[in-house]
Image (tube, rainbow, N blue to C red):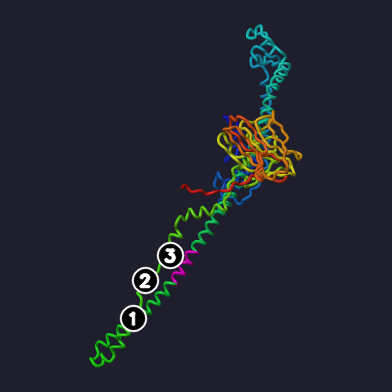
Amino acid sequence: MGSQISQSEVDFCCTICCNFFQNPVLLSCSHSFCKDCLQRWWAGKQILLCPLCKRRSSKSDPPCNLALKNLCESFLLELTLEEKAAARSEKLCSLHSEKLKLFCLDHQQPVCVVCRDSKTHLQHKFRPIDEAAEEYKKELRKHLKPLQTKVQHFNQVKADWDLAADQIKVQAHSTETQIREEFKKLRDFLKEEEVARITALRREEQLKSEMMMLRIAALNREIAALSDTVKATDKELESGSVTFLQNYKAAAERVQQRHQVKDPHLLSGALIDVAKHLGNLIFNIWNKMKEMVTYYPVILDPNTAGFNIVVSEDLKSLRYVEEVRQLPQNPERFGEYPAVLGSEGFNSGTHSWDVHVRSDGNWAVGVITESVSRKGDILAGYWEIWFSDGIYRAYSPPGIDKVLSVKKHLQRIRVRLDWNRGKLSFFDPDTGTHIYTFSQTFTERLFPFANTTNTNSLSMLPKKVILQLEM
């Protein structure tokens, strides 16, 4: 609707929404409103009143005002025809009311034949309007094609980002579950340790309390016996001389016997050994906790895993799957290789880790530089021991591809990186046999990696945790 509204348009407008009637209904008071507008107006009200005259409506579902509906549709149709006619009239020259049949190349605008001969367009170049339109459409299509390609690319990126958003939620839920499980193990261990230590304390309390009660009972008997002797002797001392002398010998013997009773004293170790229960309590629990704690020098990073690689929930093993997984195309992820990296890279020092390998499928373990592109063919920047078709190779393109002499299939392989000295060595930890050493000057961060086309798992192995106190 325009800024100026005619009276006829007002007659076709709902007083609630101020727009043309949509499915008008008629109230008993003769006022009409859009059906949806009236229902929203009445929503939640117990008494249904006309929005205009406030007269109560006898019906909650008033009948359609068919006549008004037809009039509105006819009026809207007339408006549409008028707008189309106005649009057609716009194709005439605003100066000469002639059809726009030419296009001025200098002014870049449609003109009529009268405009062509005017001073305004003197010595200008013209093209027929359809010819110019086709030429410029062709030019615009040329510029439009890259945009269409970009839209296509952006839609692909958005789809990948949507996948990443879903993956974030999945990762967060899975990680939270793993954290809760790990902390539950710790809580269970601490609870069991607490129960065991409190049980030991209460057992000691019971034993020593029972022992103390027995000693107290014996002491009470001694006290009673001594008290009886004292009373009996006092009675003899109060008797007459003849009676006293007659009973003196027996009384003296009783007194002498009581003198021989040893003085009671608290035995060593009678009290609770508090130091045993509380001394270095947290340290002792932590030391015992080592039995349930494992340390892995290499933790796999699932965000780097290729689309055919599944990393276990504990991030310690990998395996190959035939089906390509739907995963985000994040920069860290391998695009073409069934590989995964360790979560931590090294740019100094000496590092060592063991991998459980197999002889029933192809695999490789080694290190790769941080700067290597992970989306295409990797032609350099990694060093590995590669097992393929029963043959072990030391491999580092483009220069090294050496078949190794390994007497028996490896069950484990130890990787030892001395970054500062430029040495990457591989050993069989079961026999201590040296397999191969790459000598290379390293200049950037290196990440442990493994790849496999085996549906059975390759696993990172833990190191033994040793406690050593400073002397």
Q: Which residues are magenta?
A: 199-210
Residue closer to the observer: 126 or 65: 126
The amino acid sitting under disc 2 is His
Q: Closer to us: mark 2 or mark 1?
A: 1
Q: Which mark is first along the chain, 1 or 3?
A: 1
Q: Is residue 44 above or below residue 447?
A: below
Q: In the image, what residue occupies the spot 47% across and 66% down?
A: 202
Residue closer to the observer: 463 or 15: 463
Element marked by disc 2: loop
Q: Give the quadrant of residue 33.
A: top right
Q: Which mark is residue 19?
A: none
Label 1 Cα neighbours within 10 Å, binned few <14 / some 14-19 / many ≥20: some
Residue 450 placed where, x, y %?
66, 39
Q: Would residue 187 be seen by someone viewing this image from the given angle? A: yes
- Asked if residue 202 is among those painted magenta in the image, a careful observer would answer yes
Residue 239 placed where, x, y %?
25, 90
Q: Which mark is residue 258?
A: 1
Q: Which residue is mark 3?
A: 272
Q: CA distance from mark 3 to mark 1?
A: 33 Å
Q: CA distance from mark 2 to mark 1?
A: 17 Å
Q: Give the quadrant of residue 417.
A: top right
Q: Which mark is residue 265?
A: 2
